[in-house]
Amino acid sequence: MSGFFENYGFLIVTIVQQALLGLSIYFPLMAGQLSLASIGFYSLGGYVAAIMGTHPALAPLREALGFWMFPLEWLGALVLSVILGIAVGYPALRLRGIYLALATVAFVQVVNVAVLNMPIAGGAVGIFGIPQAFESRLDYIWFFGPLFFFALFLVWRIGNMGRGLAFFAVREDELAAGAMGVATTGNKVTAFVLGCALAGVTGAMSAPFLNTWNARQGTFDASVTCLAYVLIGGSRSIWGPLCGAALLVSLPELLRPLKDSRMILNGVVLVAACVYLPQGIMGGLAALRARLSGRGGAA
Amino acid sequence: MKRIVIALALVLCAAQPTLADKVAAPIPIGIAVAQTSNVALFGQEQVNGAKLAEERLNAAGGVNGTKIALVFQDTAGDEAGAVNAFQNLLNRDKVVAIIGPTLSQQAFAANPIADRAKTPVVGPSNTAKGIPEIGEFVGRISAPMTQVAPNSLKQAMKIKPDLKRVAVLYAQNDAFSSSETTTFQDAIKELGLETVTVQKFQTTDTDFTTQVTAVLGANADLVVISGLAADSGNLVKQLRQLGYKGLIVGGNGLNSPNMFPVCGALCNDVLVAQAYSPGAVDKNPVNKDFAAAFEAAYKKGPAQFSAQAYAAVQVVVEALAKIEKETGKKIADFELADLRAALNKSLRTGTYLTPMGEISMAPSGEVQQKDFYVSKIVMNPDGKTGSFVLVSE
């Protein structure tokens, strides 16, 4: 049993970490906004933690704080993400649908080029030798686990209060919601910033987890992968991002014995999931449950 | 919710020390390189080199008669993939040493894990600064750019002694190129040359008019390029087309036949420093055999990545043989943990005659390579194929 966790500890934590990124996309989706900006904030959060963890000028602070340096890094990433999220959110959220998605893709590119040009971020090699919080990769679940449950709680709580109803109203019909007196811009920006903040803190936790941080963490490919977690998992269920991340992250590892052909089978499974589960895994499960209980029929 | 909490609780109450393991026979050596993803271009070269090493070294008796078995785990191109591959090799395949990963960035993520597991890592292609410093179990046989790059500059000065003004160009979004260019720039300063302009580009660029104009405007008589094959090929082509007549020195990214179709006949005379040259066979019988065997097996000449992967396997096997000789104990009689520690020490003693020439590993894990090579590109009359011709050893 211990061998299993020694081997797959990193994978298990990676699933939770990636699920957090999925959730960070789920927040703006609650208000109907398709944003791919999360990965940019994830990258920035990671850089904040990596720089705070390794920069020689901060050595006395690190010594004084010890383990408490890590929460301080999260706080730094959180503050930066919120400020930047608001600054980006207000203008960007004037765009709708595909144009918003494009603008957020552009944001990810801007972040990428910016960090490549900042000497403090270590260029393309990035920052390495980041101080570790735990010896074992599995122990990092103490970082990501509580954050994940907190994020889930937040999603669930928001869904049950006025703010959430406003989100859903904007999602279903922005014009109608505006006509009914819902502050559409304010709600859209709030949902967007919540996602940014979550992605930023996840990044700050990920830098020590990965030992190193570089610009390759925040690429367009990575943002599409995060979106895939939500789409494959189910975009209307709070468990969707976790399901999607669990499937997409673990599949290549479970198929490892197949060697070279594993990526082919990985692709086949993903295509099958898209074709046969258009509502995602959670949507498929809900339909199955409805059919088994005889209420939903074949719909 | 409750189910997940229980599952997490199960996850967290794990982590007991594993029982002592014996070394398996044949002796498992891990190869963690990128067999998939966009890095696979390099990874496949490494697989070819490593497989050839396994075949030839086993045919020659392996470790004093005990055969070796390479265990391949794909790292793909990202950091998480490298960590997963390392975990599998360490915990499931119980290898005595790991050769890999392909990229330096992956090494920064995965090597600390092997270091904590007290298992030696031999980097076959990690050239960034700071790799051996990751830990006492981390070493490499790929010479860092600081050692390789200056050789091509020295060669350029030999060809044209009145050289003075140097233009430096590099691919800013490529980790290797951007660290290589700092090495070049330091070397330029050390050799008493003057850097007249530094231009950046992206590996995805195809139009280099801005950079070329700057080079021509600065009146440079030497251009130093750090980039990948496709972009550098285009850059060389446009430099020549717009009238640059001086010498061109390329970094390791230009050390690839993939450049030939891009710049065609205009590739001629680009100087490249190499850690390995298939042509350097006169003084090195090991390379002569290796290059011939590689050619026979894969119908093409060996690339640097293949030669370095071959050398990495060879170094591990010779270090294992040395342990048997020194302790008088067979490898199979060792506890796995003891062997890994002994192997780490053994790797760092003595010299190895590899296809790259004579190399050894310093106690820090840094490689010490005796010879470096400078080649120039000579294109065939068809303008599509060509070769690297050794100009100095």
Image (tube, rainbow, N blue to C red):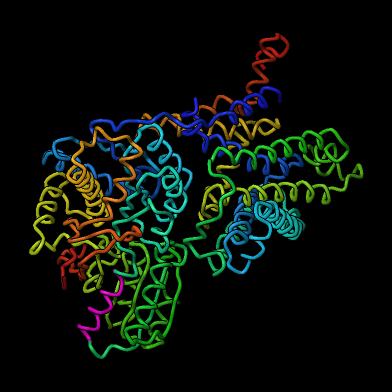
User: Which residue is pictured at 50% across the width and 27% down the height?
Assistant: A272
Q: Quadrant of the C terminus of chain A?
A: top right
A133 within the magenta span: no
Question: In this image, A63 relative to B315: left or right?
Answer: right
Instruction: Pick whichever, A20 or B236, lies toward us.
Output: A20
User: Which residue is pictured at 74% across the width and 53% down the height?
Assistant: A93
Instruction: Pick whichever, A17 or A28, lies toward us.
Output: A17
Q: Quadrant of residue B228?
A: bottom left
User: Measured from the top left, where is residue A275 in percent x and y?
Assistant: 54, 27
Is residue A267 visible in the rendered image? The answer is no
Q: Which residues are magenta?
A: B148-160
Q: Quadrant of residue A29?
A: top right
Q: Which residue is outermost to the bottom? A: B162
- Disc count in the image? 0
Q: Is residue B77 above or below residue B173?
A: above
User: Measured from the top left, where is residue B49 in percent x and y?
Assistant: 22, 47
Instruction: Pick whichever, B292 or B339, lies toward us.
Output: B339
User: Which residue is pictured at 20% across the width and 36% down the height?
Assistant: B330
Question: In this image, B241 relative to A7: left or right?
Answer: left
Q: Which residue is outermost to the front? A: B327
Question: In this image, A165 relative to A21: left or right?
Answer: right
User: Measured from the top left, where is residue B313 in percent x and y?
Assistant: 24, 47
User: Measured from the top left, where is residue B350 in percent x and y?
Assistant: 21, 57
Q: Main secondary structure of the magenta part?
A: helix
Is residue A152 visible in the rendered image? The answer is yes
Q: Is residue B60 above or below residue B261?
A: above
Q: Which residue is outermost to the right? A: A181
Q: Which residue is outermost to the top? A: A294
Q: Is residue B65 above or below residue B326?
A: above
